[in-house]
Image (cartoon, grey):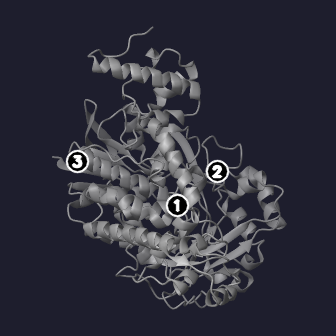
Amino acid sequence: MGQEYEVIVVGAGHAGCEAALAAARMGRRTLLVTMNLDLVAEMPCNPSIGGPAKGHLVREIDALGGEMARNIDRTFIQIRMLNTSKGPAVRALRAQADKRLYSLSMKHVLEGEPGLDLKQGHVERLLVKGDRIAAVGLAWGERFDGKAVVIASGTFLNGRILSGEYSARAGRAGEFPAIGLARSLRELGFELGRMQTNTPPRIDARTIKFALTTPQYGSDQPLYFSFEGAPSTVLSLPLNPVYPIPQQPGWRPQIPCYLVHTNSATHRVIGDNLHRSPIAPGAIEATGPRYCPSIEEKIVRFAHKESHQFFLEPEGWATGEVYVQGCFTALPFDVQLSLLRTIPALAEVEIMRPGYAVEYDYVPSYQLKSSLETRRIHGLFHAGQTNGTSGYEEAAGQGLLAGINAARYVRDQPPLELRRDEAYLGVMVDDLIAKEITEPYRLMTSRAEYRLLLRQGNADLRLTPLGYRVGLATEARYLAARAKKEAIEAEVGRLEKTILRPSPELDALLGEYGLEPIRAPISAGQFLRRPGASYQIVRAVAPSDRPLSDEVIEQVGTQIRYEGYISRQQRQVARTRRLEGRRIPEQLDYDGVIGLRNEARERLSRHRPATVGQASRIQGVNPADISVLLVYLERYRRSSMSGRHGPQSS
């Protein structure tokens, strides 16, 4: 006899964990089903969170009420701010995780969430009633009824791992693939595609010559992904003595990573053995990740480069297992060992786990709505690598949105849909819906046309009110974000009204910072826009009467210094809002739109865009097609208001 839930989540990777927690925290009775409860929030690839765009996404997940940021803050072994010499739009946090503690911590959160059940099992069947999801069936005969189901199956759909001449059916090394679930999706009429990704070898820290590496240290200043700041609990273990003395910056111990480089001998070993790699260029049909290529692909695509970077990243405090970032490969074991040993620091290295590739099915995301609900089956949502994306952060963001919208669906509430000017999460989902995804999708800052508006430091100002409105972000988080916004506005206003006048004291202070004296009275805001000026100087000559946090000060400086650029992007948003606000009826018959080119008609019918703005971003749809569509929609609107079903052809 089946048990009934409001929301069922299939898969407990980063997408599944966020989806299940979101639905449960919004008060829905939720079930999370996974193949192995010991591998919740597993990090089968890089044991890290964040980076450009990815770090922005983690902060957005936190702002909406998700868990990833808090979990990495509890369990990181190192954290850094990247791109500090560049503008605020591309600065991003990145943290190395203790991968076992990260998984254990997330499982503890899941088990402690009221209204959330966890069960181990293989989902083999999706059961529908008409065009609505009704239940999931498990391999051992269990059935669980649900009003909404989120599929977050990662690389497990028809998974196959490859290493040299070796091939086996698996979702990850040592884990069964989801064959029945892939078959069930096909039987329901979904189109499936094929992709692949790859992992590097893990090596034994006892066999690394650390003296021949370049250490990469973490931050000397406290840094956290979550807007809540320092976590109440920090998880760590005694450091494995095989590593050199860890970094002790005073605020939290960290483990360095270590940089090494390939050389001509490394490239020769790889080149001589390309024929033995199942993922060498031209050897496999499934598309691999462009922005995280295998070492085989690197030496072919970048044959002119004399070396490539490898980062040796410890996988945790207590383990001696080290991840070789940059050495993604499916070459056979003996070749992996040979290529690593061409690097002086790794001349005597031993491999603990060889790298391998994994090939898997995905469900092309043009079959989704912007809510991540499938168009074919009501109440069925897809998230993560199931949609053709790569990366833990991309998966977690989709899982959070799918969980929110599944929770809203079962109560007949409208979905939460984010625009491209509101969030990187909105950029990613819009790209998935509107663009042809032919390779694993990775979020990058260059994909966001309004990235100066989508800074990692203002994610709470942009999204916490939305998270609070849908019932996920807490009232405390909402009030904190509102207070931060008010403090920023007040300080920006104060600086624009505060006048700095030439004086010997001010000239002397500016001279200490290597700045030219001011020649006429200017506002403190105008002064901050000068090259080399800093809030520290302004605070010395015109101190605030209220204490301000570092985050407030950072946002004040950014808003004032980049005011012109921010205003320009806001005007661009206002201009495009007209197209974004024009909804397209979901069942619109594009064959009836006279004047559309055949290619545009085919692409629009396939992708079913929700708005005219989204339609304009579909490959193969040009401005003339959009003009035709706008005219048709206006006639459609007028005829609907007059009681007819649609416009008459002319």
Q: Residue at x 59, y 91 (%)?
A: 245
* Number of numbered discs: 3
Residue 474 seen by the camera: yes
Percent across and percent down for residue 552 are 45, 74
Q: Earlier in the sequence, mark 3 or mark 2?
A: 3
User: 445 left or right of 395?
Assistant: right
Q: CA distance from mark 1 to mark 2?
A: 16 Å
Which residue bears the numbered disc 2? 290
Q: Earlier in the sequence, mark 1 or mark 2?
A: 1
| Labels 1 and 3 touching (C-beta < 8 A) | no
Q: Nearer the viewer, residue 26 or 454?
A: 454
Residue 244 on image: x %, y %: 62, 89
How far across and how far down the image is residue 158, in percent? 47, 45
Distance, label 3 to label 2, CA atoms, is 39 Å
Q: Which residue is mark 3?
A: 144
On residue 54, which mark appears? 1
Q: Is residue 432 visible?
A: no
Using the image as rendered, state which of residue 649 and residue 29 is in the foreground.
Answer: 649
Say which of 50 and 538 sits in front.
538
State which mark lies toward you, 3 or 2.
2
- Image position, residue 269 (x, y; %): 79, 62
Q: Residue at x 63, y 76 (%)?
A: 533
Q: Secondary structure at mark 3?
A: strand
